[in-house]
Image (cartoon, grey):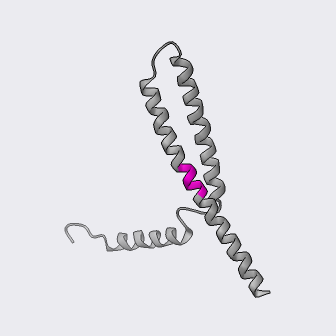
Amino acid sequence: MNQDLKKQQLRKAKDKVRKVKVFYIHLAGYVVVVALLLYNLYIVAGPYKNKIISLNLSVLVGWTVFIIIHGLNVFKGKRIFKKSWEDKKTAQFLKDKEEEKTFWE
């Protein structure tokens, strides 16, 4: 029974790693395509300029929304600033405030 639990945990961990890896590949592709589209916006000219610009901007907006949703799904439940970090910083600021002295003391 214990071995089945370990296999299940290993499978879940590998799945999470795969999801993060796919997200980073997706993010790298997004950065490359955004750079190319921005360059295209810079060089575009001619009679179809407005249509090309609107197509490029719609691709940028759509893909940006999609990558934000993808990132939220991959990193759901993860917080940048954990409660322990907040408590530690609060204690540090209180300590610094107590140690703060004026120039004439």
With respect to residue 50, does 16 lie above or below? Answer: below
Say whether residue 5 is left or right of residue 30: right
Using the rendered view, name the quadrant where residue 23 is placed: bottom right
User: Could you say which is closer to the camera, residue 58 or residue 81?
Assistant: 58
User: Could you say which is closer to the camera, residue 96 or residue 66?
Assistant: 66
Q: Residue furthest right?
A: 1
Q: Residue at x 68, y 75 (%)?
A: 10
Say whether residue 96 is left or right of residue 11: left
With respect to residue 7, does 66 lie above or below? Answer: above
Q: Residue at x 57, y 24 (%)?
A: 54
The quarter of the rendered structure image containing the N terminus is bottom right
Q: How many numbered marks appear?
A: 0
Which SS type dominates the magenta stretch? helix
With respect to residue 9, does 22 lie above or below? Answer: above
Q: Which residues are magenta?
A: 22-27
Q: Residue at x 60, y 60 (%)?
A: 20
The quarter of the rendered structure image containing the C terminus is bottom left
